[in-house]
Image: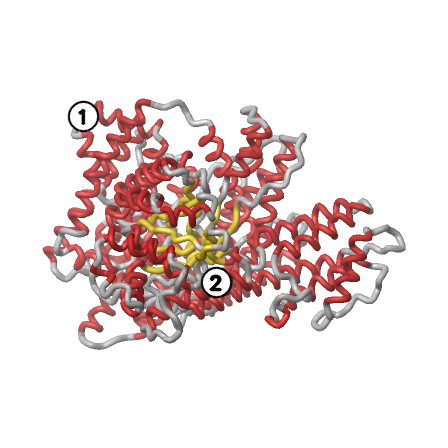
Amino acid sequence: MTELASTGRTPSNHLLRRDVRFLGNILGEVLVHQGGRELLDHVEKIREMSKALRAEFLPELYHEFVNTIQTLEPGIRHQVIRAFAIYFQLVNIAEQNHRIRRKRDYERSAGEAVQPGSIESVVQDLKSKNIPVEEIRDMLGDISLELVMTAHPTEATRRAVLDIHKRIADQVMELDNPTLTYREREKLREQLLNEVLTLWQTDELRERKPTVIDEVRNGMYFFHETLFDVLPDVYDELERCLAKHYSEESWHAPTYLRFGSWIGGDRDGNPSVTAAVTWRTLQMQRNLAIHKYEEVIRELKGQMSFSTTIVNVTDELLSSIETDRANVELTSVDPWTNDKEPYRVKLTYMRQKLANMRDEATLGTAKRYHNPSELIRDLELIDRSLRHHFADYVADTLIKKMIRQVELFGFHLAQLDVRQHSKEHENAMVEILAKAGVTDNYAALGEDEKVELLHGLLGDQRPLVNETVELSDASKEILEVYRTIHRAQQEIGEGCTGTYLISMTESASDMLEVMVFAKEAGLYRRREDGTVASSIQSVPLFETIDDLHAAPAIMRRLFELPLYRECLANAGNLHEIMLGYSDSNKDGGMVTANWELRIALKELTRTAKEHGVKLKFFHGRGGALGRGGMPLNRSILAQPPHTIGGGIKITEQGEVLSSRYSMKGIAYRSLEQATSALLTGAYLSRHPAQEDTAESQWEGIMREISEKAQTKYQDLIFRDPDFMTFFKESTPLPEIGELNIGSRPSKRKNSERFEDLRAIPWVFSWTQSRYLLPAWYAAGTSFQSYVQGDAGKLETLRTMYREYSFFRTLIDNLQMALGKADLLIAREYAGMIKEESVRTRIFNLIEEEYGRTRELILAITGQEDILDNVPVIQESIRLRNPYVDPLSYLQVQLLNELRDLRQQGQDDAELLREVLLTINGIAAGLRNTG
């Protein structure tokens, strides 16, 4: 298994091919070692036949190929599936390493070339445009990006397997070391053989669903392994580039880039996320932050051996040590007995004060740090003393980085967002208001009545309920979440949590309910001087097409409420709004969702501006194309520039986390590109292109195209009575629910309704079956309905592709989806549908639309083939397909066998296991789940 490797024209690509061959040969050795020559022969035969079929489809070869797969003895079949799946894992490692290698190639040629998308490239560009230093400072003050980790169940790979991947990646990277001796290279090969063997003998499937706390640990892994060090390095690079190109200034970049999390706070549809779990999550995050600072201080202590016999430290430092001696008892840290080394003495007390933060008995005492500012003050005190005796380099390289880490991570590591479904709040409000004697049936009130009532309750400082009132467990849990948020803000700091997201926001009352509950817990109160103090913000999540249409009116209603505006003033008149890419796509299709999201962005921004409010948009993107997935920098640049002034938040979920943040080099590159995109967006918002009269015409065309796309999409998904049968029977949807990749159920309710199916299994299922339908369906019909054979209209779409960035991004995303889709393989999945008339009719609809979409996109772009615009990706897909295909054919066979058994009331755990292994393997091969 040695042939698959991305090709290209850069000089270093031979190293990628070398790594793939190297790892493929090692896997081949492991296969022979573990399963004998027979196993490797089976794998090679299937691979060669699959490759030949891709080169030329011959019916006799196809039948031989299918027969070879179907006649595999179960023991061998299981191993063949694993061989292909593990091969993709190794190829993915090689490709990730190659991304790091390419960046290093650019850096080696510094002075000759600046890497596109780098921080240096954007700063250099701003300087060449003669942007003054004052404007640069303003731009830095305006940009803001928060990347929010979510526990959405799309990471199919176990943590144990990812750990092996990391060790393999480190060892493969060492192959580039030119100083390795022959014996060292042989030793490296032995180590890699050992790791691949370990990978082969490690179960890639989870025995149980992960708990929420398991997911919290998985999320924290990325902070521990990469982000704690990489994020400060990105800031350091920005400051280096600014100092290089704007040398007249001294630079300390404001905090513009940070991470947040939903893991442990997202209770929408997940009953396992309780208030107690949220509190434990916050504690775990705080403890990791403390642990990381203790590690850094331990390292600093080892390096800062400056002696007062040689240098003069500041009196300020010596005085602070005496204060520490008087207040802090060294109970868990050994004292530093050499008083001639004051930095080591000071750092010893600092470490003890951090350790004491784990003990609630030290709250309110001088024995511990109570907020990040206190720790920063101690670090700045050390910094001043170092500079006093000209140890500037140490201050700049060691202390400066830790100060930045404390600024970024505080004592909470990442802000934890809380999310709940709007219906849960309404249910609790019904009960609480009835028990309080306010109204017997809150749910029956009209929207105007609800708003008036809630606004009045918000202004009434009296509590609605007291401890003697008996409430249902569900209502008590709702209230307990707010009390947990209040407690966390008091003990850990306000930065730890304070954003409360409301899924399926359909009205202003949905948001006011959250604020009334917040008032009950002390998160919203009126001070003695009459002003409002609020440490929480209710954030609407607009998800469906109808919700996106209603969003501007909902926000306008809120902005006009006096008490809500007082609350908003507390946040500097900055309001966060979340837009859901997954459910809008599931609801209206890819073309319509993207267009309606763009319109919502513009309309919401205009509404907010009319009321003197700035908006921070939170973009709920998934990893897959059908859920808004795209590279991070493109996600930022895809926004209309004038809509990013209040900052951006973007979800980072599932396999995106491990692909972007498990390796330091790739994490750095991704965050560097994000910074470059932010600065580019900030420049474009300040220097907009001249108003193009053509753009308003293009927007009219897009509106027409979107309407046709929505009708075509919904005709199939919502109005065809046989569609759900087709979907469930021709994809592995039921079986995906048995893959233990997340703590959250795949449905919001225990129902078979399409509306209650979550967007992730919806997209995951279509990806596995190679249709990728949510990412492209209805586009062809919508374009054709506009063109209608008119050459002039086709030329207009070609002009839009060249000059209209929104349309170009849309078309290129459609190309990516069509390039990854494979209707030949999808036909095999359609074969699982029992009723022939349903199978034939709907598959033909999909196949016709695929052909129509492909034809129109080629006509619009002027390309000969899909993805000619990105040949590296085109070639990667072409080379991967022959390796994914066997897994797809095996999956269809296994699904048929498993479903036949289950229809007879029987089951086979080993058969299910093989199905789940094919799901993992195809996900690795396509580099996508949901």
Indicate which disc, 1 or 2, sits on the residue closer to the N terminus. Answer: 2
Name the quadrant containing residue 499.
bottom left
For mark 1, what is the residue? 790
Compared to 900, does 548 lie above or below?
Answer: above
Return the mark for residue 486. Answer: 2
Q: Residue furthest front?
A: 529
Residue 875 coordinates in the image, percent (x, y):
39, 42
In the rendered structure, which amino acid carries the disc numbered 1? Answer: Asp
Q: Can residue 428 be seen in this view?
A: yes
Q: Nearer the viewer, residue 511 or 549?
A: 511
Of 12 and 367, which appears nearest the observer?
Answer: 367
For mark 1, give the secondary structure.
loop
Kindly state the secondary structure of the residue where label 2 is placed: helix
For the residues carrying marks 1 and 2, which lies nearer the camera in this image?
Answer: 2
Label 1 Cα neighbours within 10 Å, binned few <14 / some 14-19 / many ≥20:
few
Residue 365 at x, y percent in the picture: 66, 66
Say which quarter of the image contains residue 426.
bottom left
Estimate the x, y position of residue 502 in percent, counting from the top left. Answer: 35, 55
